[in-house]
Image (cartoon, helix red, strand yellow):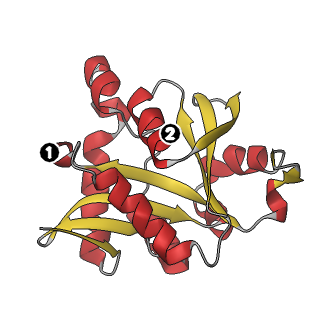
Amino acid sequence: MLITDITRTDSDLEQILTLQEQNLKQHLTEAEKLKEGFLTMQFTTGMLKRLHDLAPGVIVRDGDKVIAYAIILLQEGRKFYPDLETMFVNLETLSWHGKPLQHYNYYVMGQICIDKNYRGRNVFQMLYDKHCEINKDVFDFIVTEISTSNLRSIRAHEKTGFRKIHTYRDYLDEWNVVLWDWK
């Protein structure tokens, strides 16, 4: 039975890193990236622990096994991963409903991943439903960016309710900035 939870233990964090490693784009063929999607950013144990200390991520378990995760990246967490600074600087230039994003209380989806054996079973929606459940009274929305070549992730985010608000290119890739408004 699949259970949605938050990260609680070092074992949860280690399982997230194992799942991450299996889905990093540099470890996948072009065909796998196109069909399955991919991860761009690689977190370390130290980074993940610091982010968890600020706000535990959301996970889905099958028994004791973490089969999916969605990392919460608060703005205070930007200092733990310098490669994300470009994203945060870009977000500071964007608006939603005519107001700068910085006038809202939001967080960034730091990374979301599902074990290949569990894809197509509504796990993606389970992760985001839990995010909404635990954060909708505190935050106005979630923002994230998705590689424009990660079509599976783009479609899944659109299905959940995310809307594209901007596209830009940095030294890593071209990104769609998407937002899921809870208000």
In which quarter of the view is residue 148 placed? top right
The picture places residue 34, in percent across and down from the top left corner, at 34, 22
Disc nearer the start of the sequence (1/2): 1
Residue 81 figure quarter: bottom right
Is residue 144 rendered to the left or right of residue 101?
Answer: left
Per the image, the residue denoted by label 2 is 158
**Which residue bears the numbered disc 1?**
117
**Callout 2 secondary element:** helix
Q: Nearer the viewer, residue 26 or 122?
A: 122
**Image point (70%, 29%), residue name:** 168
Total marks shown come to 2
Q: Position of residue 39 (x, y in %)?
A: 40, 40
Residue displayed at 47% across by 73% down: 133
What residue occupies the far front of the structure in this picture?
183
Image depth: mark 1 or mark 2 in front: 2
User: Considering only vertical position in the picture, is 9 above or below 103?
Assistant: below
Q: If the image is split into quadrants, where does the C terminus sit?
A: bottom right
x and y, in percent, of residue 93 in the image: 84, 45
Instruction: Decide which of 109, 54 is in the foreground and name it.
Output: 109
The residue lying at 35 percent from left, 75 percent from top is 7
Q: Secondary structure at mark 1?
A: helix
Q: Quadrant of residue 86?
A: top right
Relative to 76, say whether 38 is above or below.
above
Name the spot of residue 58 as percent of width and height, x first: 39, 68
Q: State whether residue 8 is above or below residue 143.
A: below
Residue at 58%, 31% in the rendered image: 172
| Res 34 seen here | yes
Q: Is residue 121 left or right of residue 86?
A: left
Residue type highlighted by circle 2? Glu
